[in-house]
Amino acid sequence: MCGIVGYVGAKDCSEVLVSALSKLEYRGYDSAGIAVFEDGKIRIEKEKGRLLDLQKKMESDGVPKGNVGVGHTRWATHGVPSSVNSHPHRGGDKVTLVHNGIIENYKELKEQLIAQGRVFISETDTEVVAQLMDMNYEGDPEKAIAKTLAQVEGSFALGILFADRPEELYAVRRESPLIVGVAEGESFIASDVPAIIKYTTQYYLLEHDEIAKLTHEGVSFCDLEGNSIEKELKVADWDQEAAEKGGYEHYMLKEIHEQPTAVKTTLTPRISDGMPNLEECSITLDKLKDINQIYIVACGTAMHAGMVGKYVIEKQCKVPVIVDIASEFRYRDPLIKEGDLVIIISQSGETADSLAAMRLAKKMGAKTLAIVNAKGSSIAREADMLIYTHAGPEIAVASTKAYMVQISVMYLLAFELAFAKGEITKEECRRLTDILLGTSANIEKTIELVDGDCNTIAEALTEADSLLYIGRGLDYALSMEGSLKLKEISYIHSEAYAAGELKHGTISLITEGMPVIAVATQNALYDKTVSNIKEVKARGAKVILVCDEQAEVGADVADFIIRVPRIEEMLMPMLAAVPLQLLAYYASVRRGNDVDKPRNLAKSVTVE
Ligand code: M6R
């Protein structure tokens, strides 16, 4: 998964490409590069490292001058992050391209190409496509692209320059996302809308195996047989400011602060007359009534949102829920029956494993419901039913506001399902929905309340080699997310454990001073969790307790207490999530890490 961009227009192409790439670095940041037609010839500038490293290199080399070009930011899959493996790649004299995705049969193709005398300089699968395209090019770009696509297998989006066509840019995709933006006298390609939002809000979604041709005269589309295609012009509702840091030191902090608005914007249009109403998402009470089994399939944080959903749906609706990691689900022969509901949760809507799991579920006769943030993404487009979360662009690799809106939708769905199944009355459903909507204000209050404490307490985490998150029930589901957040941005090892399970082995890890973050917001389980806290405390743990403002905490229970407002017990994860996010954030800042772009990661995981 990488980010690709391209530009044709009157502006300084290098400047546009670098600006667009800066919005795509969340997709990968192992290396960056651009290729621009300069005086009729393609000039490539690329460098290992961040976009900033490329910019520095170009300061000394000189920035390519021209009006047509492509750019790339990489998350390495084939071959180490290095200058030579960076994109753009030349295929020979005729073709230069950038690529996002994976060419599955690149080894066979490479062997064939070598046998035909081709010489490779990089370890990438991309160079194989470039060489193949170069071989296939006989003056007709569309034909060369079609011929190449007939030979390659996998997922990819390509931005292609043909050396003898200095006024043209071509793009094509299969599986990997790609949009084509248009404005007066100029056009763009990009992996995602935020990359070009500074220049235009108008764009086309390129479909599988469609070819786009961008020239100074405009944009045209055709299929692999060369038949021209009319496409619907879309208008993005994300503005530039939403994709910028807006005065915050990091995107992650900004996104934590955007949670109250994100929750409100997501829920409000789905509530009418105080009741959940998901009809615009093709979800009716009649459809819900017939559901007897639910699978929630997702990856990472989105899967953790599914864990919260499981606890809530099973309790409220009495419908069994299985939560599956998408990469496991797709290969474990799941026992899906016709009529089961499979819910796919994804911020990006492009996560390869989640997309494949959804396709499998559909094939097996299940109804699929996608909960997705990125508009027009693959998962959104292919699901039977769709609930868009309205978190706006999430740029930080560590997901915060997307998680918050995902769990808000889980609750809303659970309340409607419980009502449809006759498990709760209309009055109860209204009451719960009202409290859910009110979480927006409570999240805001929580951020104000806990921010300072989290910053201070994070100091106690920074020197730790390892720590534990413990909780029971919903607090356990939330602990999983807290633990992931901390690991991915602070690089401190942590595990989330069901508090009651500790004494079956894991408690042996506790040593003097080891931090344990205990989440205890569920009344019925509170005393039991406190007993488990005392067990770790007795063995030297330094306990950080997250509980509600009314909890009675004995003097010997915790070293630090973080209190959040008390609301309906079931909805407490929406508030308790905030201190867990902030602890991770401040721990990462204190350790001097790159908070928004943690090592080895990328925002959108479009490879298996
Ligand atoms: O775009 P998705 O929601 O499908 O992404 C799933 C995971 O890759 C993602 O949540 C990942 O775990 C985040 N880095 C967590 O902060």
Image (cartoon, rainbow, N blue to C red):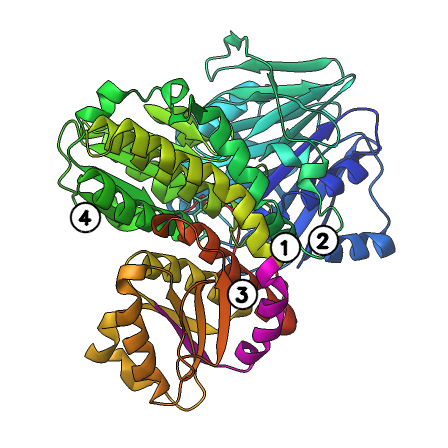
Tag count? 4
**In the image: residue 15, left or right of residue 121:** right
Dot placed on the residue nearer the N-terminal end, 4 or 2: 2
Task: Identify the residue position indicated by label 1 in the image.
Answer: 253
Seen in the image, is 503 located left or right of residue 273?
Answer: left
Between the C-alphas of marks 1 and 2, the distance is 7 Å
Residue 375 image position (x, y, % from top left): 51, 29
Amino acid type assigned to the residue bearing label 3 in the image: Ala
What residue type is disc 1 on?
A: Leu
Image x and y of residue 127, in percent: 54, 45
User: Is residue 279 at least partly visible in the picture?
Assistant: yes
Magenta span includes 459: yes
Viewer-nearest of labels 4 and 1?
A: 1
Please give the label number shown on residue 248. 2
> Residue 332: which disc?
4
Q: Earlier in the sequence, mark 3 or mark 4?
A: 4
Q: Is residue 361 magenta?
A: no
- Real-space Cα separation, disc 3 to disc 1, in angstroms: 11 Å
Residue occupying the point 23% across, 26% down: 420
Magenta-colored span:
449-470
Q: Which mark is residue 584?
A: 3
User: Percent x, y for residue 588?
Assistant: 59, 68
Q: Nearer the viewer, residue 97 or 591?
A: 591
Residue at 64% of width from left, 66% of height from top? Answer: 452
| Distance of label 3 from label 4 (alpha carbons) | 33 Å
SS for callout 3: helix
The secondary element bearing badge 4 is classed as loop
Callouts 4 and 1 close, C-beta under 8 Å? no
Q: Earlier in the sequence, mark 2 or mark 3?
A: 2
Question: Residue shown at 28%/82% (left/top)?
Answer: 507
Amino acid type of the residue tagged 2 in the rendering: Tyr
